[in-house]
Image (cartoon, rainbow, N blue to C red):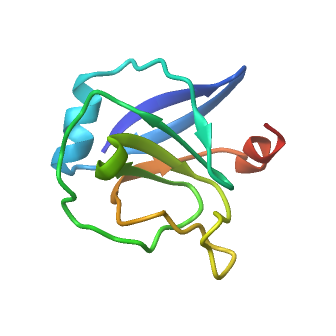
Amino acid sequence: MKPIKIFINDIEFGAVLNDTKTAEEIYKILPIEAEGNFWGNEIYFEIPVMMPNEKPTEEVEVGDLGYWPIGKSFCIFYGRTPVSTTDKPKPASAVTIIGKIKGNLEELKKL
């Protein structure tokens, strides 16, 4: 697990990247500065990494960080998305879980 910091506007969040190959490739290109997109309670942005899904899943938890290969995107899941059927987030299609964000994720809902 590798600790990282994520800054969204003026809010700093601690996070950890897991030991997947995808997370390792993302760690190598840090820092990243990007304009985020919102999809419900998910923030995502394109990154210069092209990796296949290692362990594809559509089951994510609040606070999960994911890599979405279709959009070459880094995803931050902090609540329901437009395709959620429960209180949990659900990605548009399968992602690789690459880590976890920490902190008060309710702050993200104010953006």
Answer above or below: position of 91 versus 24.
Answer: below
The quadrant the C terminus occupies is top right
Residue 54 drawn at (x, y percent): 18, 60
Judged from this view, the residue extending furthest toward the bottom is 85
- Residue 108 position, x and y percent, is 73, 42
Please report the residue visible at 35 percent of the width from the left and 60 percent of the height from the top: 95
Q: Position of residue 49 (x, y in %)?
A: 24, 33
- Which is more toward the observer, 44 or 106? 44
The quarter of the picture where residue 17 lies is top left
Residue sticking out furthest to the right: 110
Depth check: give the residue in front, 89 or 24.
Answer: 89
Is residue 56 toward the left or the right of residue 100 in the image? Answer: left
Relative to 24, does residue 41 appear above or below in the rendering? below
The x and y percentages for residue 103 are: 66, 44
Question: Where 22 sits versus 3, above or below?
Answer: below
Q: How many marks?
A: 0
Whether residue 105 sits left or right of residue 33 in the image: it is: right
Quadrant of the rendered image containing residue 48:
top left
Residue name at image x 16 percent, y 46 percent: 21
**Residue at the location (40% across, 52% down)?**
66
Residue at the spot 70% in from the left edge and 22% down from the top edge: 9
Q: Could you say which is closer to the camera, residue 4 or residue 91?
A: 91
Q: Quadrant of the N terminus?
A: top left
